[in-house]
Image: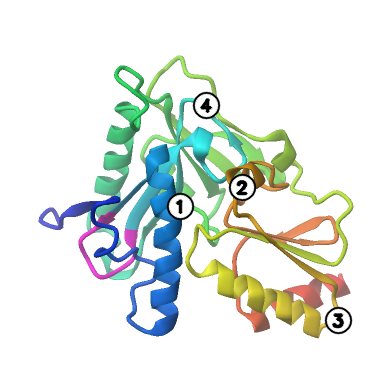
Amino acid sequence: METVRIIDVDAGNIEREHVCCAIGNDADNKARAAAKKAWLAARFPEGHRFKKADVRGKVFIEYGPAESAWFPVEAPGWTFAQCFWVAGAYKGAGLGSRLLSACEEDALAGLGRGPGTGDAGVCFIAGKKKLPFLSDGKYLRAKGYEAVDEVLGGEVVLLAKRLDPAAPRPRFSAASRACRLEGGTGVTIFWSPQCPHVPAYAREMAEAAAELGVETRLVEVDTLAKARALPSPFGIVSVFLGEELIAWEPMPADKFKKLLTARAGS
């Protein structure tokens, strides 16, 4: 698909471009897209980028300076890629390679930090194996990325590619490394508007827990400071049962009830 354009969504075209995860023209998807676009528009001045293939599908990469990433990653001078997705029929067509190359080229240029300030490299959160709502670690390793930090016994890793050979390694923040909510009780759901589907799912999960009689707390991660202080590395969603991290993906009520029931019985 060499002829497919890669579109750089920015302040000048965001109103007319779709944002991949909320494409439909129904009321729900329009509301999701509007919320995501508002979040993106506020990030563009910080150097945040959203690039997508000019197709009607989920083919995009989203990244920015790690210092302003809404994830608890310590990587000054690095680019942090928060979402990278090539879905369905578009897999294997070379679009992922083109999007990743565009990200790395922007990192070399410094993401607007100033002349001669090319980034140290690019990093992603990924799973040791393919995991929901995380980038594909196997694919990234094949593209030259290596694990530089890990949590959850190596199940989740921080993958990085140095563009500056002397750059220090990025790492998960100290607060996020344990993946525990000290003093937590009941169900606590940290959720961020970074993903257009998360607000509705977070409410649905909270209602599901309440129906099971479980004390539930929804915490909106609506500022950079809150995101940087999260007690797990998962900036989109982090779900705790008591002090234990039990999920980092939004899910429908039935699936969440099954998870809570299984945890209660274990």
For the residues labelled 1 and 4, the Cα–Cα distance comes to 23 Å
Question: On the rendered structure, is 223 left or right of 119?
Answer: right
Crowding at dot 3, Cα within 10 Å, few <14 / some 14-19 / many 20+, comes out as: few
Q: Amino acid at mark 1?
A: Asp
Q: Colour scheme of this structure image?
A: rainbow
Q: Residue at x 79, y 49 (%)?
A: 180
Which kind of residue does numbered mark 4 sit on?
Pro
Quarter of the figure that contains the N terminus: bottom left
- Label 4–label 3 contact, CB within 8 A: no
Label 1 belongs to which residue? Answer: 136
Which callout, 2 or 3, points at the residue further toward the start of the chain?
2
Q: Label 4 to label 2, Cα distance in Å? A: 21 Å
The label on residue 76 is: 4
Image coordinates for residue 29, horizontal then vertical, percent: 41, 77
Above or below, comparing residue 47 to residue 97 in the picture: above
Q: Which residues are magenta?
A: 52-59
Q: Earlier in the sequence, mark 1 or mark 2?
A: 1
Callout in the foreground (1, 4): 4
- Alpha-carbon span between mark 4 and mark 3: 43 Å
Residue at 72% over, 34% down: 174
Percent from the top left, x then y, of residue 55?
A: 22, 66
Q: Amino acid at mark 2?
A: Val
Whether pointer 1 and pointer 2 mark residues with C-beta atoms closer than 8 Å, the reply is no
* Label 3 secondary element: loop
Image height check: is 213 above or below 99?
below
Q: Quadrant of residue 264?
A: bottom right
Q: Which mark is residue 213?
A: 3
